[in-house]
Amino acid sequence: MSAASDSRPAVVWFRDDLRVADNPALDAAARTGRPVVCLFVWDDRSPGLRPPGGAARWWLHHSLTSLDAGLRERGSRLVVLRGPAEPTIAALLSDLDAAAVFWNRRYGGPERRIDTAVKTAAREAGIEAESFGASLLFEPWTIRTGSGSPFSVFTPFWRACLSAPPPRKPLDAPARLTHGPTVDGLAIDDLGLLPAHPDWASGLRDAWEPGEWAAHSALDAFAAGALIQYREDRDVPGVDGTSRLSPRLRWGELSPHQVWHTITAARDARTSDAAATFLSELGWREFAYHTLFEHPDLATVNIHRAYDSFPWPRLHPSVLRAWEQGRTGVPLVDAGMRELWTSGSMHNRVRMVVASFLTKNLLIDWRRGERWFWDTLVDADPASNPFNWQWVAGSGADAAPYFRVFNPELQRTKFDRHGDYVRRWVPEWGTAGYPEPVVDLAESRRAALAAYETVKSAQRA
Ligand code: FAD
């Protein structure tokens, strides 16, 4: 290779992998010895892409800022561009006379189409283009049933994962990056990801510190602390008993490999069962992504098509609004919805309860709830969000059976026995100011089961 060709840069295209450590694409670029251009493209134009919702944008802004700082410490910086990814990247590669472009894979349908087009165009132009596995422990095409089809039930899926070759060890962050040529980009602020008028993000700021280094602290603190009690505490919303790593994984501040190996290293006789339970939760994340890979329309189309005939009654907008705003008169539901609005998150047990309440007691289409979560969760995830909504609604992979209607009052007395969680988010609970329930729980359960008969008839037909 000549000296002149050595100076042609390698481009790293960041997307859901906003970290410098254990980043195979960045690692590959650094190893070329070429100058490295680190790129983020804000693509709100390409067809089919689902733009992140408000809370996720807030997170993205801060996570990009942290990534830029991590890159600067290594002698590089983040170049930010805006536009449809395919032509934007093709133009940049040509302007820079780039030798290579690297990225870590995505698994959604439109994302894969874009990535394939970028790869094909780059290779046709004589530019090396490579993608890497970084966001999943097991690539979807490697975990198959004996007959070669994807799994549709979690337990055998996870068993197959655990008997596959174990996840690779995390990679170190490159110590130094050779700065690439200057590119005229945007400031992260120019993307307008933060809410301004009004600034509704104060609850998010109180609850979270986005960024790669904060993510490592959170992981280490969990491994040394709450992990030991995870099996007992993970279902209790009034206790900080879970890892709160989901937005870190969503935005790739942490890779699942880093989480896997940190938890495995912390595993000893006392934490062994807790660690196995926790790792199986990472397994649900894998399962959701594998399901998205097989069902690119996961956010809009029922996996079990018999549910297409579900007779969703005509929606009364005020009922949906009461659910969104946490004013249903059902304390655990209201607590969860207010936690979500204020902090951009909600405890998993309560997510299941509010989703069951919406789809079954209120008979509102799961897609309405999925969209609200998409806009309000900092961890809103293209796989886990629709996957879990379909799971609760009964239309999804390995779904909870439709007739499993969570009773939110029983759930409250079981998992929030002393009322800590509900009182925190619904201080007026138990006073005259608290409304009556918007539906009768027993009656609405019966109506849901009657509506479900339609699906059963469609299934039989
Ligand atoms: P922990 O209990 O500490 O679990 C560790 C990690 O495992 C999580 O960070 C997450 O990455 C993964 N995980 C745990 N449970 C699940 C699950 N059921 N499905 C997929 N991954 C899981 N999770 C998201 O990351 N993004 C979403 O958009 C999302 N939407 C959901 C919608 C509904 C209706 C429901 C019922 C669940 C949803 N979940 C979603 C799953 C789960 O609620 C969150 O991952 C969990 O609450 C995050 O808290 P944690 O990090 O403390 O979890």
Image: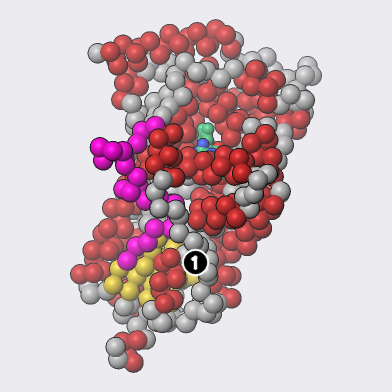
Secondary structure state at the residue bearing disc 1: loop
Q: Which residue is mark 1?
A: 171
Compared across the picture, whether 272 is left or right of 126 comes to right
x 64%, y 32%: residue = 235
Name above or below for residue 84 compared with residue 325: below
Residue at the right extreme, as displayed: 431
Q: Amino acid at mark 1?
A: Leu
Residue 144, magenta (yes or no): yes
Residue 100: x percent and y percent? 33, 74
Q: Is residue 274 visible?
A: yes
How many residues crowd around disc 1 within 10 Å: few (fewer than 14), some, or many (20 or more)?
A: some
Compared across the picture, whether 340 is left or right of 429 comes to left
Residue 265: x percent and y percent? 60, 55
Residue 165, magenta (yes or no): no
Residue 313: x percent and y percent? 42, 16
x 76%, y 30%: residue = 420
Q: How many marks?
A: 1
Residue at the bottom extreme, as displayed: 3
Residue at the front extreme, as displayed: 269
x 38%, y 79%: residue = 32
Q: Is mark 1 within 8 Å of ligand 1?
A: no
Depth order, front residue of 31/83: 31
x 34%, y 92%: residue = 3
Which quarter of the image is occupied by the N terminus? bottom left
Which quarter of the image is occupied by the C terminus? top left
The magenta region covers 130-153
Q: Which quarter holds ligand 1?
A: top right
Dominant SS in magenta: loop
Name above or below for residue 229 compared with residue 178: above
Residue 380: x percent and y percent? 51, 43
Q: Is residue 344 visible?
A: no
Name above or below for residue 317 compared with residue 272: above
